[in-house]
Image (cartoon, rainbow, N blue to C red):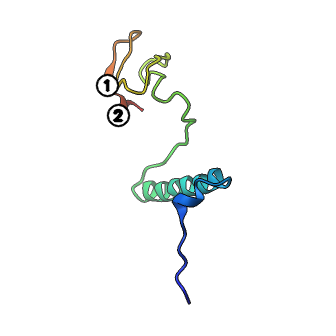
Amino acid sequence: MPEANLNIKGQALTRLSKSINDAGWGQFLTILTVKAGNAGQKTIAVNPKNTSQDCSNCGKKVDKELNIRTHSCPHCGVVIDRDLFA
């Protein structure tokens, strides 16, 4: 039987792209949840909107452009790398 060759990158450029990308993300979350459970941990889904804008320390929104790599909250004073912060 011939091997199936899926062109995921090509398919992601079609009108089915949202479905394809959502399926991949869903599978990743499933694997992550199982791995976390095996380690005695749990995963909690959060809405990703503003995850690097809302301060994780005080909850206030701190607007910043994508090129700003450090979160510095003027409200509570916390300073943290944006990638760790998100």
Near-viewer residue (28 or 42): 28
Q: Quadrant of the N terminus?
A: bottom right
- Left or right: 20 as drawn, with respect to 71: right
Q: Which mark is residue 84?
A: 2
Q: The residue under label 2 is which amino acid type?
A: Leu
- Point 38% across, 10% down: residue: 74
For the view shown, which residue lies furthest in the bottom direction? Answer: 1
Q: Are marks 2 and 1 in contact (CB under 8 Å)?
A: yes
Q: Residue at x 45, y 28 (%)?
A: 52
Rendering coords of residue 5 (x, y %): 53, 74
Q: Gap between marks 2 and 1, in whole Å?
A: 7 Å
> 39 or 49, which is in the foreground?
49
Vertical arrangement, residue 86 with respect to residue 29, above or below: above
Q: Residues within 10 Å of mark 2 (few under 14, many from 20)?
A: few
Tell me the SS state at disc 1.
strand
Q: Amino acid at mark 1?
A: Ile
Query: In percent of the image, x 55 and y 59: which residue is there?
Result: 10
- Mark 2 secondary-structure assignment: helix
Viewer-closest of 53 and 31: 53
**Mark 1 neighbour class, 10 Å CA radius: few under 14, some 14 to 19, many 20 or more:** some
- What is the x, y in percent for residue 61? 50, 17
Quarter placement of the C terminus: top left
Task: Find disc 1 in the rendering and name its residue.
Answer: 80
| Residue 38 horizontal/vertical position (percent) | 42, 60
Residue name at image x 39 percent, y 56 percent: 39
Residue that lies at the very extreme toward the top in this rendered image: 75
